Image (cartoon, helix red, strand yellow):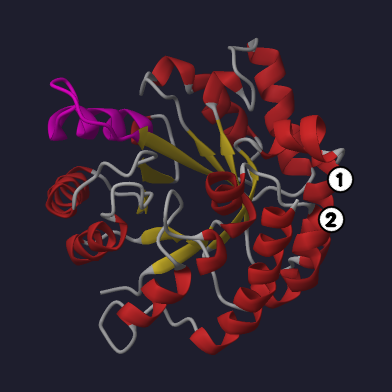
């Protein structure tokens, strides 16, 4: 069994979920080199609401943020969340805008693009996946959005995942943005996907319903390749399970992440101060 890989979300979804995306670049800079040495699969640091919030609330240039992070992070791939035909906005944009935005993101430092559509409609993902594949350099991850309804079945999720694989994505993410995926459903879904897919599978969940860590453990037992976590000052609650907790839970097992937890404590201490700063504002 290959080790479980960790994608760290504290620089994007962690503070988006806990602090309305208000972390500033200056609050990230002191620990970027240390984070680069941890051995993460990727650092999620851009996309989602960060682009909007930088301009609307923080008086920051989101492109300059990305370029600056790239200067300090030399080893670890930088990841972003991309809303398909919506790019990083709240309506559909023309194909040429999608193509240009993808190319600018890659040119400015993005290594992994996670592409999703809230309705799991592949038509809304075609342009962004093709644009990303055409760069010949970026890892393209297709996401299927998990939710619960009479039409959202194991079979329907598998159908979407297979369509994404056929579109040429390099990996699949199960994007459980509401934290609704229960442990045994995660186990069964990943087992089914593993039977039909040849690309790696990543799982993204939130602790909103209190299931996060249990869901990850069952997903790992089912063979998931990568999990998303956030360092504890911006983990848990409505964010991802805590990085330190998952690393320690998997230590000395066949799923060991190979991350030295002692490397995490100084970074955790830094983000404790950052969270207090944000709470005091």
- Residue at 15% x, 52% y: name it: 191
Label 1–label 2 contact, CB within 8 A: yes
The residue labelled by disc 1 is: 64
User: Of 181 and 141, which appears nearest the observer?
Assistant: 181
For the point 60% across and 18% down, the residue is 90
In x, y percent, where is residue 271? 65, 68
Magenta residues span 145-164
**Which residue is labeled 2 in the image?**
68
Percent from the top left, x then y, of residue 170?
Answer: 45, 45
Q: Residues within 10 Å of mark 2 (few under 14, many from 20)?
A: some
Please count the marks in the image: 2
Q: At 32% from the left edge and 73% from the top edge, which residue is drawn?
A: 2
Residue 270 relative to residue 176: left or right: right
Q: Which mark is residue 277?
A: none
Q: Residue furthest front?
A: 280
C-alpha span from label 1 to label 2: 6 Å
């Amino acid at each position: 069994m290959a080790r479980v890989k960790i994608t760290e979300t504290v620089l994007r979804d962690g503070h988006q979920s806990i602090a309305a995306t208000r972390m500033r670049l200056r609050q990230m800079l002191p620990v970027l080199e240390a984070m680069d040495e941890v051995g993460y699969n990727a650092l999620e640091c851009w996309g989602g609401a960060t682009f909007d919030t930088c301009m609307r609330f923080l008086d920051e240039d989101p492109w300059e943020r990305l370029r600056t992070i790239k200067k300090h992070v030399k080893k670890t791939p930088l990841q972003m969340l991309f809303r398909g035909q919506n790019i990083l906005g709240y309506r559909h944009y023309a194909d040429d805008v999608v193509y240009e935005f993808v190319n600018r993101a890659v040119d400015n430092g993005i290594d992994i693009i996670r592409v999703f559509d809230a309705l799991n409609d592949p038509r809304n993902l075609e342009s962004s996946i093709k644009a990303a594949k055409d760069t010949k350099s970026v890892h393209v991850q297709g996401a299927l959005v998990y939710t619960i309804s009479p039409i959202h079945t194991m079979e329907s999720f598998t159908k979407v995942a297979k369509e994404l694989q056929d579109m040429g994505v390099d990996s699949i993410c199960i994007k459980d943005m509401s934290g609704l995926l229960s442990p045994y459903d995660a186990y069964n879904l990943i087992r089914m996907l593993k039977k039909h897919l040849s690309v790696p599978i990543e799982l993204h969940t939130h602790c909103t319903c209190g299931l996060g860590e249990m869901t990850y453990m069952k997903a790992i037992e089912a063979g998931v390749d990568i999990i998303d976590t956030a360092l504890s000052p911006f983990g848990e609650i409505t964010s991802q399970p805590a990085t330190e907790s998952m690393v320690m839970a998997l230590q000395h097992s066949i799923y060991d992440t190979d991350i030295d937890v002692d490397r995490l404590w100084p970074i955790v201490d830094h983000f404790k101060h950052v969270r207090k700063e944000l709470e005091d504002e």
